Amino acid sequence: MSVYDMPRLANFSAVAKHYNDIDPVISKRHTRENDVRPLGDRRRKYERIHKFSHNCYAFYDGDMGDPIQYSDHHYMAKDIPMEACKALAPIMWTLEEQVKDNRGVWNKEILRVRNGSGNGAHNGRYSFLERALPKEFTFVVDNGKQFISLHGVRYFLPKSEFYTWSYRRDITKVQKDDKKYLEFERSPGGSWKIRTNSFTFVPPRVLVDKERKKKFKPAMDSYYSWLLVMAPMFREHLEHFQYSYNDQASQDRYQAKHNLAKLKRDELFEYAKEQKWVQDQYVWGYEPKPEHALIIMEDEEHPMRMHMAWNMLVDSVLFDENESERKKFRAHYNRWINKVCGFNKTIKSQIITNTEEK
């Protein structure tokens, strides 16, 4: 089914008017009392507007928390209380009455925007937000993250852990709203601005455990020096060269380089099998676990020292004609040894809540 445009309603009054102008869908499954009012095309009745009160309307997209059952297989609010359904709405419009001064009462519009629940892709939600938000707002997907852009500022829109799909496996688990949504507000005559908390996504980081690495520094330096002596003996099979389809000699050299690399990988894997480091099933691109890599690195007579480093050495800058490039080999070695020996530690991604001043 095609994706249809919807009216990008600009303010609360337009939302209320749009609701009143729509006739409810009446079918064998839905009565007038169900009050199913599509935002746009009536065939997409799950993209609808719901009235909670005279000053609160929600837009639903048929995803988690929508209290309407559309078919035998499309019911996203089973065992979910109405309060949670309200909290899970993708878009919520609220009119908040406030006393400004002695001139009387003035109203503040509040727009709440919510991403899907759970870490998976919520493509239907992304499409819905893109089509249903007021024109001042732009929904953006960038590098797998979602943002709401307003006045040139991007606000990260995190995914919630409130009523994810996993709740169906254990409906007894207590669900608590983590309030991972964005709220914007606008006063009469004013512009939209962020109202409550905003969020910052901090991607996962890989840091070096310097204290642990320090214990192995003598062995690491010795291994590096050993490779500088031994690698040139295999220079023809390690250094980068210009391959040509029209040159039989370069094709033969490429094949010999490929065959030797495969032999080194196979021998390393066979050794790992003998040591019971792996199961019998072949692992493509096998690399020893950190505890096994440390054994190889620390033993200056170990038969697998060159084998373990082979993939790191292939096409490295060690044999580059430019001296300044060759000097980068130490950094290349350090990155590799940190990884293979387990000196790296991963800091998980975080979502930081930024409290906004009201």
Image: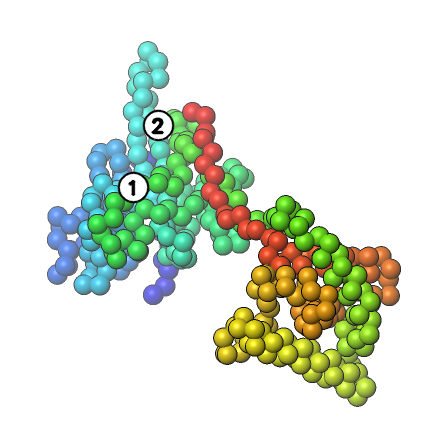
- Disc 2 marks a residue whose amino acid type is Lys
Left or right relative to 240: residue 210? left
Say which of 151 and 213 sits in front: 213
Quadrant for the N terminus, please. Answer: bottom left
| Percent x, y of residue 187 | 39, 27
Is there any visible trace of residue 71 in the rendered image? yes
Quadrant for the C terminus, please. Answer: top left
Which residue corresponds to the image point at 53% horizontal and 54% vertical from the top-left?
143
Residue hosting label 1: 176
**Secondary structure under badge 2?**
strand
Is the residue marked by circle 2 packed among few (<14), some (14-19), or many (20+) residues within 10 Å? some
Classify residue 239 by image quadrant: bottom right
Is the residue marked by circle 1 packed among few (<14), some (14-19), or many (20+) residues within 10 Å? few
- Disc 1 marks a residue whose amino acid type is Lys
Q: Rounded to the nearest whole Å, what is the CA distance between mark 2 and mark 1?
A: 28 Å
Classify residue 189 by image quadrant: top left
Which residue corresponds to the image point at 63% horizontal and 64% vertical from the top-left?
295
Q: Residue furthest bottom?
A: 248
Which residue corresponds to the image point at 50% horizontal and 40% vertical from the top-left?
200
Q: Earlier in the sequence, mark 2 or mark 1?
A: 2
Say which of 166 and 70 sits in front: 166
Classify residue 223 by image quadrant: bottom right
Q: Residue furthest top?
A: 102
Residue hosting label 2: 108
Q: Which label is found at residue 269?
A: none
Above or below, comparing residue 17 to residue 225 in the picture? above
| Percent x, y of residue 90 | 34, 46
Say which of 49 and 179 sits in front: 179
Question: Contact (CB < 8 A) between labels 2 and 1?
Answer: no
Above or below, comparing residue 60 to residue 13 in the picture? below
Camera-near label (2 vs 1) is 1
